[in-house]
Image: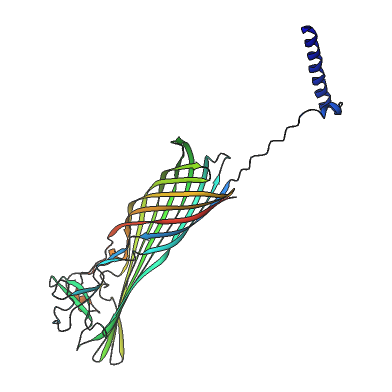
């Protein structure tokens, strides 16, 4: 009996094999119709390109300016009015940081993956913050004593030049400084493994940053029989070029993701300064213009430049949510620190030889002198964006 069952099973298997062979050869369609069908395998949907756009809200360290405008109570003697350190002198503008407000901006990042597993790729990015400016004005109608303080190296004492002083001159002064910050980068990305459930990626590439400040000081004063206008201008620019190195991590859970990135760029700052100024004097209908205002004289007018080693560490955190197969929304935080940046305040020498003012007779030290004092710049703030995989 057992032998009979084995023979029947053997016949069934042989018939099945024969049916399959015949179906493949096209000779037994009736038997082939009885065989189970398997759905074809779908090709992997690999999209190598991706792009991200972020709105930025960042705070940037301001430019530190020396005391530029002072005042004193009416009745203060001429020799001490507006002089730093003298009784009653008040700083109206300067001796503080300017342009340290929050700034709006944007960032665009795009990348390309070399393999479907997205383990190797490149990305390029650019960010820019909106220009921010600080302004100040004063006039003798509301502030009778308006002075511009400086240090006199001939007397080795603090002194002041007057925009307005009751009974001698009336006038006004306006100061404005505009600051800008932008940057770009190109990175190669290579996965190096998994750690604590995170995908860890090594980063190497190029980093570029540019910071600039433009400071303008202008004043007009009227005296008996004439008038004079004074202008000082300071322009500072720093451009960083460097090698960018870092690590990035990514964790995913359902539609949620958490990303972090730490980098440090090593390279050089190309720092430059532009100093210019003029004094326009009008008497009896005759106008004469001389180079130099108050803080700008022939001794420091011109262009300066220097190259210095700089370091730029940067940290970024992002939380994301998948809203569609190709779309993700992100919110995060960025922090950046940049060493040895040239700011406009670092170009100003407040030591002035009065013998050089308005084409004076000269003699004494050549001050103000060209300076290029640098300082660190930091920027930090929030980002909100969307990422799209093509």
Q: Residue at x 23, y 91 (%)?
A: 224
Q: Residue at x 31, y 87 (%)?
A: 287
Q: Residue furthest front?
A: 1
Task: Return the x and y of residue 9 as percentages of the image width and height.
Answer: 78, 14
Residue 362 seen from this side: no
- Res. 11 image quadrant: top right
Q: Taking 180 as reference, is 1 above or below it? A: above
Q: Tell me which colouring the rendered structure shows.
A: rainbow
Nearest the eye: 279 or 33: 33
Nearest the eye: 355 or 117: 117
Q: Taking 253 as reference, is 97 above or below it? A: below
Q: Residue at x 45, y 61 (%)?
A: 105
Task: Please state, as top left, top right, bottom left or bottom right, where the N terminus lies in the image.
Answer: top right
Q: How many marks?
A: 0
Task: Return the x and y of residue 147 as percentages of the image width and height.
Answer: 22, 78
Task: Return the x and y of residue 234 as percentages of the image width and height.
Answer: 32, 69
Nearest the eye: 124 or 45: 45
């Amino acid at each position: 009996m057992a032998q009979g069952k084995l023979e029947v099973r053997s016949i069934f298997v042989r018939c099945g094999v024969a049916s399959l062979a015949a179906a493949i050869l096209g000779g037994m369609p009736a038997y082939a119709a009885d065989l189970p069908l398997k759905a074809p395998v779908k090709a992997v949907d690999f999209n190598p390109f991706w792009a991200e756009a972020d709105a930025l809200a960042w705070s940037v360290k301001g430019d530190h300016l020396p005391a530029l405008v002072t005042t004193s109570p009416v009745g203060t003697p001429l020799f001490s009015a507006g002089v730093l350190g003298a009784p009653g002198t008040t700083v109206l503008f300067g001796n503080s940081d300017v342009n340290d407000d929050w700034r709006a901006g944007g960032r665009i990042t795009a990348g390309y993956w070399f393999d479907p597993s997205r383990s190797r790729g490149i990305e390029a990015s650019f960010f820019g913050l909106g220009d921010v400016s600080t302004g100040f004005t004063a006039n003798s109608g509301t502030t009778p004593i308006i002075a511009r303080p400086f240090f006199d190296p001939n007397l080795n004492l603090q002194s002041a030049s007057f925009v307005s002083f009751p009974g001698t001159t009336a006038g006004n002064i306006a100061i404005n400084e505009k600051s800008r910050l932008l940057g770009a980068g190109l990175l190669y990305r290579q996965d190096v493994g998994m750690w604590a459930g995170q995908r860890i990626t090594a980063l190497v590439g190029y980093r570029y940053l540019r910071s600039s400040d433009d400071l303008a000081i202008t004043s007009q004063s009227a005296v008996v029989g004439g008038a004079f206008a004074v202008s000082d201008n300071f322009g500072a620019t720093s451009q960083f070029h460097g090698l960018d190195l870092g690590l990035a991590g990514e964790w995913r859970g359902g539609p949620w993701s958490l990303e972090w990135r730490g980098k440090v760029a090593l390279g050089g700052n190309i720092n430059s300064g532009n100093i210019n100024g003029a004094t326009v004097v009008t008497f009896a209908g005759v106008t004469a213009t001389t180079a130099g205002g108050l803080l700008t004289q022939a001794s420091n007018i011109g262009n300066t430049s220097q190259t210095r080693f700089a370091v730029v560490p940067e940290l970024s955190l992002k939380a994301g949510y998948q809203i569609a197969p190709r779309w993700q929304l992100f919110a995060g935080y960025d922090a950046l620190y940049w060493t040895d940046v040239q700011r406009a305040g670092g170009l100003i020498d407040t030591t002035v030889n009065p013998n050089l003012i308005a084409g004076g007779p000269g003699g004494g030290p050549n001050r103000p002198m060209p300076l290029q004092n640098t300082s660190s710049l930091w920027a930090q703030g929030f980002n909100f964006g969307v990422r799209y995989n093509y």
